[in-house]
Image: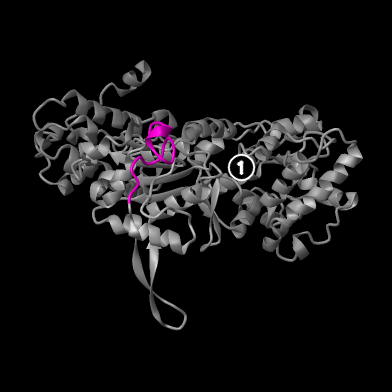
Amino acid sequence: MSTLTKNHGKLYFDALIRSQKGNSLLAFIMATYHTPSGLGRDERKQEIADRVKHGYGLFRDNVRGYDNGVGSYDTSISAFQSQYTLGLEMGIWKNSKLELSDLAEKVAKNNITIRDYLTVVMFNYFQPVNSENVSPLKVILEGLRDQKEKSFNTNDLKKFFENKKISTNSESLNALNDLLKNTRFFNYDEKEKKLVYCYPKTINNLLSEIPIRYIGEGGYDLAKVELGTEEKYTKYLTEDLLGISVEKKKTYNTVNDNNIGYNKIYYGIPGCGKSYYVNNVVLGGVDEDKIFRTTFYLDYCNSDFVGQVMPTIDQNGVVKYDYTPGPFTLALKKAYELAESNEHIYLVIEEINRGNAAAIFGDLFQLLDRAKDDSKSLYGKGSSEYPILNSFIENYFKKNNVKYVDGKIYIPSNLTILATMNTNDQNVFPLDTAFKRRWKMEKVNSNWEECDFSDFFIPIKESKITWRVFADHINYHIISKRDSMEISKEDKQIGAFFIDDEYLIDPTETYGEKELQEKFYNFCYKVFEYLWSDVAKFAKDYWFKSPNDDVLKPESFEKLISLLDEYQLDVLNISFKDIDKQDDDN
């Protein structure tokens, strides 16, 4: 095997700044990227060693126990040699000349983040322990799956590895925990001090995709043959099997559009994945500090959106009044501050039609008219054609030293407003024509290929009907009779993400009777309540029937659940026969 990953008697990770792994790797990457080419090997290593110290200094305040953030690191070659093992094991350098790997270079060029980088690497990563290769991520995901949990701390980590008879120590577990904290697989819950699984695939599906060619018995010997050089190992480790890098490139092209701001509403049926599409496709490559989010609801008003003067109590107990900005004002402030640097800001409004949008926007409504060319606005293409006077925003800007012109508040071209709208809820607060014409509109279709649980079974006894087949049959029933009096319209359809995997039966799992019953009731109150109260609101005779000659059709929702529990789907006026044949045809 190459020297990049050594065979240990227990799980091991380099001890370098164990609470700052992401920053350590970023320091290595940026130091290498900015080191001039054409230097000899030793000279290049010394130059990188010098620059690494500056990289450490950028995060020195966050490194406990390290003077100036660099501890005993003195930029000597020997000191650098003792610390850069982590970079070698994580695939930053592709050869002994310390040339960056292709994926690390994308981090240096700001095409992806260090979080993206570590997501790819930890997905592929394995470590020889007693001559048997171990995938730490695989062990953890299997532990979460077996415990039916989605979060863990270092004590849980220890148990996961003990269950696999893999030796560990607290130092390496803390280091592994910090590495995983810097991936897209987990978020850190500060309150609970736990990592929480957050990747948009189910744990089982992600597990099934982890590369296992070199994992387990015999993997060590195979890896020594096939990945025995630094170049081969690094290429394997940084192969983007998850599409992180490709997605980022595609997404940046989608959202920036030459930095011209716009207003756009993404609409679709319930559960089609509008929010997921906006957050992961449209905004997939945007840093969170460039995104401001809010959700409209029945009592949401202009002061919630823009801001208001609120009382506060200082340390001496004196009541004072201060400007409390809403999400629009916060996004606008950030856009003004970054306008010269050409950085783009996004305001995301979920459920825009769940509140009275025209009233919530108020005088901001006028700002939604965007200039289509530079001659239409003093502030250029993509900015508001008609500025307004808004005393709250101006006073807040003045207090926070934001540059603006009196009476000329406008949306700049580097601020884009995105919104989602459930077509089934248009009767809550319908958007009038004048409001809608100021927005681009894009329909989001339910993408079953992105649904990791489409083949899970619905929890109706032992029906063995998958979620996708069930939803397709319901939707066909809606569409085929959409012109009939009092029968549901097309926008009543059920999307792939109307529910999540917790409501369904994973065919690879084993469940107890109590857990199955709980899933049954949760599914009924989520799906069948929607069918009963919304889809079939005025057409219950069309949707529901007597399960047999001796039992009356349901006259209430509670009766419907009771009949479903006893007679399964026979209470629905929909034929689920020949499902297997239909699946084969598809």
Q: Nearer the viewer, residue 180 or 398?
A: 398
Specify the quadrant of the image occupied by residue 527.
top left
Specify the quadrant of the image occupied by residue 94.
top right
Is 492 covered by the magenta stretch?
A: no
Query: Which quadrant: the C terminus?
Result: top left
Q: How many marks?
A: 1
Q: Position of residue 230 (x, y in %)?
A: 80, 33
Q: Nearer the viewer, residue 318 or 574?
A: 318
Specify the quadrant of the image occupied by residue 157.
bottom right
Q: Which residue is mark 1?
A: 113
Secondary structure beneath dot 1 equals loop
Residue 231 relative to residue 552: left or right: right
Q: Position of residue 360 (x, y in %)?
A: 27, 51
What amino acid type should be assigned to the residue bearing mark 1? Answer: Thr
Residue 534 relative to residue 285: left or right: left
Q: Position of residue 347 (x, y in %)?
A: 41, 46
Image point (16%, 33%), residue name: 488
Q: Which residues are magenta?
A: 371-388
Residue 511 relative to residue 97: left or right: left
Query: Which quadrant: the N terminus?
Result: top right
Query: What is the residue that sits farthest to the top in this orientation?
Result: 585
